[in-house]
Amino acid sequence: MKIVERYIMRRALLLFLGALAWTLTIVWTTQVLARIDLVTDSGQSALTFFEVASLIIPSIIPIVVPFALVVGIAQTLSVMNTDSELVVVAASGASRMTVIRPILILALCAGLFSLIVDNGVDPYARQRNRDLVATARADFLSLIIQEGTFRKVENGLFVQIGERSPDNRLGQIFVVDSRQEGLDLVYYAKTGAVIDKGPVKVLLMNDGVVNRKTPDGEVSIIHFASYAFDLSAFASANNQVTLLPKDQTTPYLMHPDPNDRIYQQSPNSYRAELAQRFSDWFYSITFALIALAVAGDARSHREARVHPLITAISISLFVRWLGFFAAGKADSSAAFSYMIYCVPVLGAAVAGWFIYTNRRMELPLSWTDRLANMVSRLMERLTYLRLRLSGAAWREGGS
């Protein structure tokens, strides 16, 4: 590899790693916030929460890597053009492959990295994540009997324990059951206990009352000496781990179990997931070619055009949206599974055609002019509205 090629690769690699770190951090933070209820609702430790949070990273790497790559490449080439480095490279008699070769090598390495993570790391991380979540939710019986807490077992069912004695006896038990529409049941018992014998899990309440409100508005109060509230269904439901196509390993997707309930209901989802895993890595190459087609040639500083980084990201977003659209439709139609492969390949072919024919891939300036005019008119209207509101407030204050 020539010195100038190593120079281009080093600059693009540094920007790529920086963009990857920031993008991963932002996307990871949004995903983690959606799972913070694992600690607040299930009473798990912070260590379990951070383990679940770390297992999210492999699932977002294949999506983030191509965008970080297009940012790094487009920004590198744009800065090199601004500093007249691309002009010097072209004037020295070097071919366009001097710029293209290191970029494609970097894109290929990034694509292979995404392929390994998507097929070798992410499925096992997802399965471990589901095991942790299932374990946390299956431990809800010990969660219920925590003293002085009001816990939600499921939608419409709440349990509160007032006190707990050393012999595991419970006191001041309060249960609200509104799962059946139009029927509200409120239980209160002075004492009780949780009976846990294998699959049988019962909340036994002693010396209490149940308030029953029917759909027609009638309220009845029933005293009971003992009442057994079955919790087995909730425990078994929370303890089950259901693996979706995204959670399965790649060999399993190639040869799924015919008795798999999800496979029987939606076999296309397995084909779609397999197609995604073998096509996502190619977006790195596609986005690299788009960045090259947008910013890979030496251009005059006086030439009016949209910033190459904006153009490259906009086109990449459109291509990736087409991929997501095909993946969403592939669950219901097998024909879209082929479209999942075609989107990145066609995107790379179009970008490669622009590079081969020395054409420029860019957004029309008329689009940006229209956008600028829209923003200008919006700002004028907001300013006019603010002046009218301030004038009305001044008149009211004067009167």
Image (tube, grey):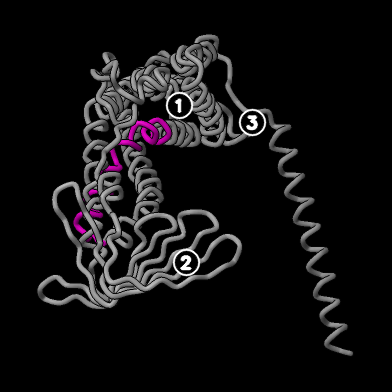
User: Magenta region: which residues?
Assistant: 43-68
Q: Is residue 294 visible?
A: no
- Between disc 3 and disc 1, whose residue precedes? 1
Tell me the crowding category of disc 1: few under 14, some 14 to 19, or many 20 or more residues within 10 angstroms, Cα based. Answer: many
The disc placed on residue 247 is none
Q: Which residue is mark 3?
A: 303
- Between disc 2 and disc 1, whose residue precedes? 1
Q: Are marks 2 and 1 in contact (CB under 8 Å)?
A: no
Residue found 31% across the figure and 74% down from its top: 189
Q: Position of residue 165 (x, y in %)?
A: 15, 77
Which residue is nearer to you in this view: 11 or 326? 326
Q: Is residue 179 visible?
A: yes
Tell me the crowding category of disc 3: few under 14, some 14 to 19, or many 20 or more residues within 10 angstroms, Cα based. Answer: few
Q: Which residue is mark 2?
A: 212
Q: Is residue 130 left or right of residue 157?
A: left
Q: Are marks 3 and 1 in contact (CB under 8 Å)?
A: no
Q: Is residue 34 left or right of residue 3?
A: right
- Residue found at the very far left of the displayed protein: 167
- Between disc 3 and disc 2, whose residue precedes? 2
Q: Position of residue 373 (x, y in %)?
A: 77, 44
Work out whether 250 lies above or below 241. Answer: above
Q: Which residue is mark 1?
A: 86
Quadrant of the frame with the C terminus: bottom right
Work out whether 129 lies above or below 296. Answer: below
Front label number (3 vs 2): 2
Q: Amino acid at mark 1?
A: Leu
**Can residue 326 be found in the magenta stretch?**
no
Helix, strand or loop at mark 2? strand
Helix, strand or loop at mark 3? loop
Q: Amino acid at mark 2?
A: Arg
Q: Position of residue 129 (x, y in %)?
A: 25, 42
